[in-house]
Amino acid sequence: MVLNPLCPFGAARVLALKATVVLLLTLLIKAKVRITAFSALGIVLLLLQTLLVLAAGGALGLLAGAAGLYALQQRRMATA
């Protein structure tokens, strides 16, 4: 029986290819998890920003209404 001297190198190449595939799959799964997590974080920050803009708009509306009522009351006091 003749032993093939290249057989260990062939096995090493197959094992290296399997290790590369496992590494690439691991990196792909990690990237997918990271993209999902940061997408969720982005959505939360967008909702927070929207709520803050709406709250600021409501506060400015209240201030404008109060200023208008105050000016109307001052005008009535001046004419009375």
Image (cartoon, rainbow, N blue to C red):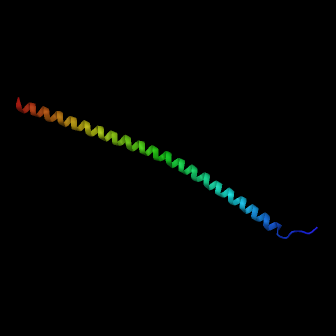
Residue 70 lies left or right of residue 35; in this view the side is left
Image coords of residue 61 (percent x, y): 26, 37
Q: Which residue lies furthest to the right in this view?
A: 1
Q: Residue at x 68, y 57 (%)?
A: 21
The N terminus sits in image quarter? bottom right
- Please state the horizontal and vertical placement of residue 72, each as a whole percent of the image: 13, 33
Tell me: 25 left or right of 10: left
Say if 11 sits above or below 56 in the image: below
Quadrant placement of the C terminus? top left
Residue 45 located left or right of residue 4: left
Q: Is residue 19 placed above or below 70 in the rendered structure?
A: below
24, 70: nearer the viewer: 24
Name which quarter of the figure residue 76 lies in.
top left
Q: Is residue 37 left or right of residue 50?
A: right
- Please give the name of the residue rendered at 34% of the width and 42% of the height, measured from the top-left corner: 53
Q: Where is residue 56 in the image (x, y as percent from the top left)?
A: 31, 41
Q: Which residue is drawn at 46% across and 44% down?
A: 43
For the point 66% across and 58% down, the residue is 23
Q: Where is residue 62 in the image (x, y as percent from the top left)?
A: 25, 36
Q: Which residue lies furthest to the top in this view?
A: 80
User: In the picture shown, does residue 70 fall above or below 40?
Assistant: above
Camera-side residue of 21 and 67? 21
Relative to the observer, which residue lies in front, 60 or 21? 21
Residue at the bottom extreme of this rendering: 5
Q: Quadrant of residue 54?
A: top left
- Reply above or below: 23 against 70: below
